[in-house]
Amino acid sequence: MVGLLVRPEVPAVVEPYLPIAVVAALDAVFGGLRAMLDGIFVDKVFVVSFLSNVVVAALIVFLGDKLGVGAQLSTGVVVVLGIRIFSNAAAIRRHVFRA
């Protein structure tokens, strides 16, 4: 939300990795929310998970770019993180709606 309001300048070098980093960050946020609802949330684990998800996802895509398969690895990262996001969203829904 802040990014939409502030509209920061994103360096061209980082631009290809930003969408992957956002998806990785969303995965960490949904995982943290799920952990909070399950009563097992630990702030240090969340911060490490958030940062490591973003860095590892960006590194995978960077490596893919260097190997010439950046689009395929980007798709793979989005699919894997998407599955995790939807799994966490389903667990959150079950917890909130008891269904």
Image (tube, rainbow, N blue to C red):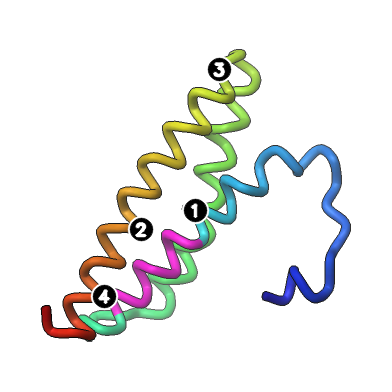
Q: Which residues, given as a range, are shown in magenta?
A: 26-35
Q: Secondary structure at mark 4?
A: helix
Residue that label 1 marks: 24
- Residues at marks 1 and 4, CA–CA distance in whole angstroms: 18 Å
* Residue 64 in the figure: left or right of residue 76: right
Amino acid found under the numbered disc labelled 3? Val
Amino acid found under the numbered disc labelled 1? Ala
Is residue 29 a member of the stretch shown in magenta? yes
**Viewer-proximal residue among 73 and 51:** 73
**Marks 2 and 1: which is nearer the front?**
2
Q: Earlier in the sequence, mark 4 or mark 2?
A: 2
Is residue 34 a member of the stretch shown in magenta? yes
Q: Earlier in the sequence, mark 2 or mark 3?
A: 3
Numbered badge on residue 92: 4
Q: Position of residue 25 (x, y in %)?
A: 52, 60
Neighbourhood count class around disc 3 (C-alpha, 10 Å): few under 14, some 14–19, many 20 upward: few
Task: Place residue 63 in its image quadrant.
Answer: top right
Q: Image point 20% across, 81% down: which residue?
A: 38
Cβ atoms at labels 2 and 1 below 8 Å apart: no
Q: Position of residue 93 (x, y in %)?
A: 24, 75
Neighbourhood count class around disc 1 (C-alpha, 10 Å): few under 14, some 14–19, many 20 upward: many
Cβ atoms at labels 1 and 4 below 8 Å apart: no
Q: Image point 48% across, 32% down: which residue?
A: 75
Residue that label 3 marks: 69
Question: Which quadrant, please, contains the N terminus?
Answer: bottom right
Amino acid found under the numbered disc labelled 2? Ile
Q: Earlier in the sequence, mark 1 or mark 3?
A: 1
- Residues at marks 2 and 3, CA–CA distance in whole angstroms: 24 Å
**Viewer-proximal residue among 48 and 38:** 38
Q: Secondary structure at mark 2?
A: helix
Numbered badge on residue 85: 2
